[in-house]
Amino acid sequence: MAKKIRKKLCSRQLAAVYVSIVLLIVLLIIPTGYEDAQIYQDMDKCAAEVLKTDESRIIDTGLVRSGEQSCRVRLLGGRFKGQEADAFNMLNGSLENDKLFAVGDKAQVVVSYDGDEILSVNMIDHYRIPWEIALAALSILVLVAIAGRQGIRAILSFVITVLMIWKVLVPTYLNGYNPIITGMLITGILTVVIISLVYGFERRTAAAVSGAMAGLIVTAVLGVIFTDVLKIHGAIMPYSESLLYSGFADLNLTKIFMASIFIGASGAVMDLAVDITSAVWEVVCKKPEIGWKEAARSGMNVGRAAMGTMTTTLLLAYSGGYVTLMMVFMAQGTPLYNIFNYKYVASEILDTIVGSMGLVSVAPLTALCSGWLLTHKSRKLCTENGAQVSTNTEQTDEI
């Protein structure tokens, strides 16, 4: 009997994995629709090794450098692999975007050519892809070694999330679809996929997804309301103006910012929903005769303990990228009254507080959903998932 139960549970988890793999294949195949929009489409892109540098045309004014760095490079790939050529590196006086190369560095370059003749070589940035691949491989090895099969599912959900954002979310935004509706639909799909990879297709998945989506809806509504109240414009997002000047002037950046609030909080929301669902499930399996109200109360107690750290997690996640801005405020002696009134700071406050309120709403909503769904026919449910329903302690221990 126990083998049949475990087999049934395993089949539900495998079904979720198979569905996720199919979704992954579909995402890999479908085009974004912007493949022909590459500005370097008719040029050769490859890595190059820096053999020699010349900084004589760089204007150095302390921290800011402008002008042009000339380099002699050996092309490491593409149609001109192995050939040497002169390359240029333009400096625009921006520490954020400018880069300098030294002998021995590997650079990402774009080669402009006419037939078999190299016309120019533009040095785009340092070549980082091999190290990024190595870092990703190391993280995969560590995750699989520690988490085993669950680690493989986590990797699968991570890859699906990346592809869903790149292949679906970004193109739909560029095509002018409503960012809030689109963002909610895509986040909902990801929530179902990610949580089903944890539990399989069963009631725990339904409970966790219900609580998480309810929390995301609360976050979205609050984000829309307070973005308007605080008069935050979406142009505060990095590179948003560059996007408008690239031929997408009709995009509603403010709605994209609104959507980013609940998308940014969705990871913590799912985490909390799964924690509460798992806690309620354990209570129900250990005490099958428990009522849904008592089970929901137990889930709420777990949620209260988790909310404190989750809220702080959001604060640290959102504020980490603005440490230098806070340092500028402090160095200049900017009054707190002025700091809290800046739109950049107000947007971060909005992200953090609205995201936290969404988390607060997830706890009771998930507890209620879990309490109702997991205690309903709990004896049958626990049996189906491999837990012994009998109140006999010895029998329970044997299972």
Image (cartoon, rainbow, N blue to C red):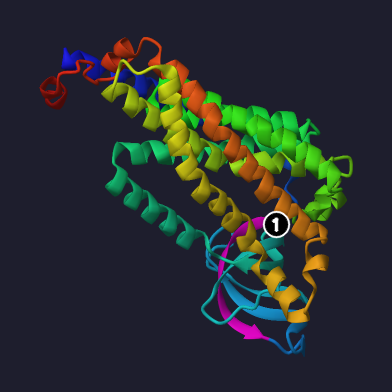
Q: Residue at x 59, y 83 (%)?
A: 52
Q: Residue at x 36, y 9 (%)?
A: 377
Magenta stretch, main secondary structure, is strand
Say which quadrant the N terminus sits in. Answer: top left
| Residue pointed to by mark 1 | 115
Count neighbours of disc 1 (C-alpha within 10 A) and say few if under 14, some if 14 to 19, many if 20 or more.
Answer: few
Q: Quadrant of residue 72?
A: bottom right
The image shows residue 88, relative to residue 353, as above or below, that is: below
Res 254 seen here: yes
Residue 130 at x, y percent in the picture: 47, 60
Between 347 and 170, the residue placed more toward the observer is 347
Between 1 and 159, the residue placed more toward the observer is 1
Between 265 and 88, the residue placed more toward the observer is 265
Q: Residue at x 54, y 41 (%)?
A: 267
Magenta region = 42-54
Res 40 seen here: no
The image shows residue 109, relative to residue 263, as above or below, that is: below
- Residue 53 covered by magenta stretch: yes
The amino acid at mark 1 is Gly
Residue 178 at x, y percent in the picture: 78, 31
Q: Is residue 376 left or right of residue 179?
A: left
Q: Quadrant of residue 325?
A: bottom right
Say which quadrant the C terminus sits in. Answer: top left
